[in-house]
Amino acid sequence: MKAEDNTYQIFSFSLILKEIEDAIRNGNGITGRFMNSATGLYNTVTNADNVQRGLAAVIL
């Protein structure tokens, strides 16, 4: 695994932890906030065309 991959994974994980922390602090519940983020990401990926997916793969 490349160092860039590790950095991306750590960054992604820290964003998820921040979402969870914010949800707990605001009393919104973890599931709702996390599900909204996950659903948005899923919709973005599934609605992307092949060029967009290719660009995302190169960036990631």
Image (spheres, rainbow, N blue to C red):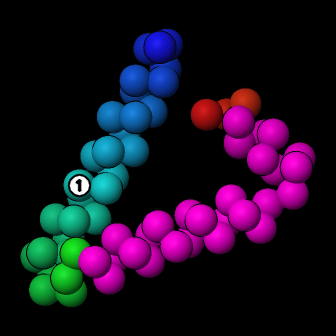
**Residue 5 location in percent, x, y?**
48, 24
The extreme top residue here reads 2
On the rendered structure, is 55 left or right of 44?
right
Q: Is residue 38 above or below residue 27?
A: above
In front: 43, or 11? Answer: 43
Left or right for 28, reference 43: left
Residue lying at 77% horizontally and 67% vertically, measured from the top left: 47
At which x and y percent is residue 15?
A: 33, 52
Q: Dot 1 lies on which element?
A: helix
Tell me the quarter of the image containing the C terminus. Answer: top right
Q: Is residue 14 left or right of residue 48?
A: left
Q: Residue at x 22, y 65 (%)?
A: 20
Asked where in the image residue 59 lies, by quadrant, the reply is top right
Q: Which residues are magenta?
A: 31-57
In the rendered structure, does residue 12 fall within the stretch colored magenta? no
Q: Position of residue 1 (x, y in %)?
A: 47, 14
Kindly identify the amino acid type of the residue bearing the numbered disc 1.
Leu
Identify the residue position indicated by label 1 in the image: 17
Seen at 12% across and 75% down, the residue is 24
The question of residue 56 being in magenta is answered with yes
Left or right of 2? Residue 28 is left
Measuring from the top left, give residue 21's x and y in whole percent.
Answer: 16, 65
Q: Is residue 22 above or below residue 8?
A: below
